[in-house]
Image (cartoon, rainbow, N blue to C red):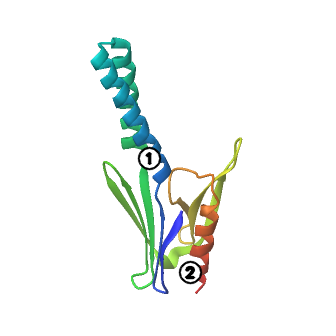
């Protein structure tokens, strides 16, 4: 996650999976290239594998990739999490006064991965800003920016 906008009244942080979008788009193009070369050469094996690979990459693109943007608005006492995918957009709204802090959630494994979670006081609950974990330290920077903004 990274800070997109920062003022005394509003803070906006977002997670935009540019690397994964480019990687999956490359997979789609590779599958399409193998499919077309198979069609031109009348090679059914290449047509099958190119088509299968391309279709699976398109399904991944549609189901997995999402942009998450979190708005913190003092003027309207609002925290809004907007998740936008290829197929749909979702919005979750909460009262800013109920937000206690932002924390980094860690997922163990071979390498640790991170995501930002919002801790609410009333009622006691934790809301993850996204479904996926990230291996970079950008989540810690975003959580620090949120906590600093809340402290002002």
Task: Indicate the position of residue 110 as horizontal and vertical percent values.
Answer: 71, 41
Marks 2 and 1, the one that precedes in the sequence? 1
In terms of image quadrants, where is residue 143?
bottom right
Q: Which of these two is toward me, 68 or 37?
A: 37
Q: Is 62 rendered above or below residue 67?
A: above
- What's the residue at 40%, 27% (across, down)? 53
At mark 2, the secondary structure is helix
Above or below, 74 against 33 in this view is below
In this view, 108 is above or below 137: above
Name the quarter where the C terminus is drawn.
bottom right
- Hey, which quadrant is residue 71 in on the image? bottom left
Q: Residues within 10 Å of mark 2 (few under 14, many from 20)?
A: some
Q: Nearer the viewer, residue 123 or 119?
A: 119
Q: Residue at x 48, y 84 (%)?
A: 7
Q: Nearer the viewer, residue 93 or 125?
A: 93
State the SS at label 1.
Answer: helix
Q: Tell whether label 1 touches label 2 (CB within 8 Å).
A: no
Identify the residue under disc 2. 149
Image location (x, y in percent) of residue 86: 33, 49
Q: Residue 126 at what x, y percent from top left? A: 56, 61
Callout 1: few (<14), some (14-19), or many (20+) C-alpha neighbours within 10 Å? few
Q: Quadrant of residue 9?
A: bottom left
Residue depicted at 64% across the width and 65% down the height: 140
Alpha carbon separation for disc pair 2 and 1: 32 Å
Find the residue positioned furthest to the right.
110
Tell me residue 3's x, y (percent). 52, 71
Residue tagged 1: 22
State the quadrant of the N terminus: bottom right
Q: Is residue 1 left or right of residue 47?
A: right
The disc placed on residue 48 is none
Residue drawn at x 57%, y 72% as measured from the top left: 121
Which of pointers 2 and 1 indicates the residue nearer the eye? 1
């Amino acid at each position: 996650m990274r800070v997109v906008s920062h003022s005394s009244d509003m803070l906006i942080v977002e997670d935009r999976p540019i690397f994964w979008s480019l990687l999956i788009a490359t997979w789609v193009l590779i599958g399409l290239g193998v499919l077309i070369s198979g069609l031109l050469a009348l090679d059914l094996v290449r047509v099958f594998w190119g088509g299968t690979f391309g279709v699976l990459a398109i399904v991944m693109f549609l189901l997995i990739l999402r942009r998450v943007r979190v708005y913190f608005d003092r003027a309207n006492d609002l925290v809004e999490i907007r998740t936008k995918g290829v197929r749909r957009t979702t919005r979750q709204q909460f009262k800013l006064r109920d937000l206690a802090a932002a924390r980094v959630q860690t997922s163990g494994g071979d390498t640790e991965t991170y995501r930002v979670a919002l801790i609410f006081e009333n009622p006691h609950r934790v809301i993850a800003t996204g479904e996926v974990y990230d291996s970079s330290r950008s989540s810690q920077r975003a959580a620090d920016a949120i906590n600093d903004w809340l402290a002002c």
